[in-house]
Amino acid sequence: MNEHRILVIEDDLDIANVLRMDLNDAGYEVDHADSAMNGLIKAREEHPDLILLDLGLPDFDGGDVVQRLRKNSAVPIIVLTARDTVDEKVRLLGLGADDYLIKPFHPDELLARIKVQLRQRTSESLSMGDLTLDPQKRLVTYKGEELRLSPKEFDILALLIRQPGRVYSRHEIGQEIWQGRLPDGSNVVDVHMANLRAKLRDLDGYGLLRTVRGVGYALRG
């Protein structure tokens, strides 16, 4: 089986079942949500690698769902819709969707677009000023020097660098990096952030990591 898990947010059960079969045949694990609210809950709890989002959901507009997802996650989002207008496509991409596919579509085209999104997310280097992170090699450099991080420190930095300036709460970091398995009151996030800050300082990366008292952490964009 493919290691990647895809969340399908689609209220039409017939379409959802066809998508599930096509994706399973291609080796993906699939979760399904039949409403926007259920999709948002599953996205938060299950941490999918990619989301297929139907635009015509009964409870929320697809654009609202994209915006809500983007508040907490950089997960790739491919919108599936029958609305074939340039204005709508531009609107959704502007809200944070990664791709847009018009119904009806051929399964092979969908699978090709999924592969592109997953490949980009796993192989592209992420940069912010002199700080560069290579997800594929799990390598971080600052001003050309390697920053040696633990696996969790790397994952935290990868989360923060995808949206420089965005403040992540301790709870959000715990959800993303530890899949919500940290007990209430745990200081594990703070310990890892302190270690990460110290390692950045060792390479003269003073001030890169920002602490917002009572809120959380961010990389200075």
Image (cartoon, rainbow, N blue to C red):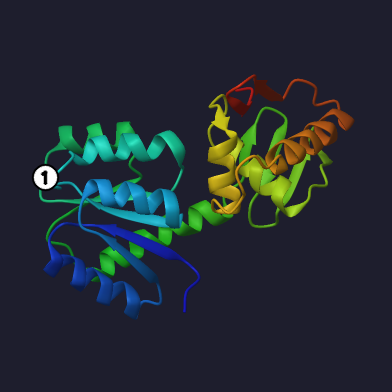
Left of 117 or right of it: where is 53? left
Relative image position of residue 4 (x, y in whole percent): 46, 66
Q: Position of residue 137 (x, y in %)?
A: 70, 57
Q: Label 1 neighbourhood size at 10 Å, few (<14), some (14-19), many (20+)? A: few
Amino acid at circle 1: Asp
171 relative position to 9: left or right = right
Kindly identify the residue that appears in the image at 72 percent across and 25 percent down.
208
Position of 200 relative to 105 (above/below): above
Q: Which residue is mark 1?
A: 84
Depth check: 134 or 75 in front?
Answer: 75
Residue placed at 28% from the left, 60% from the top? 8
Residue plotted at (46% across, 54% down): 47
Quadrant in the picture for residue 29: bottom left
Decide if residue 172 is on the left or right side of residue 92. right
Residue drawn at point x = 15 percent, y = 43 percent: 59
Question: Which of 111 and 193 lies nearest the eye of the viewer?
Answer: 193
Q: Is residue 19 left or right of residue 15?
A: right
Where in the figure is residue 215, as x and y percent of width and height? 57, 24
Figure quadrant of the C terminus? top right
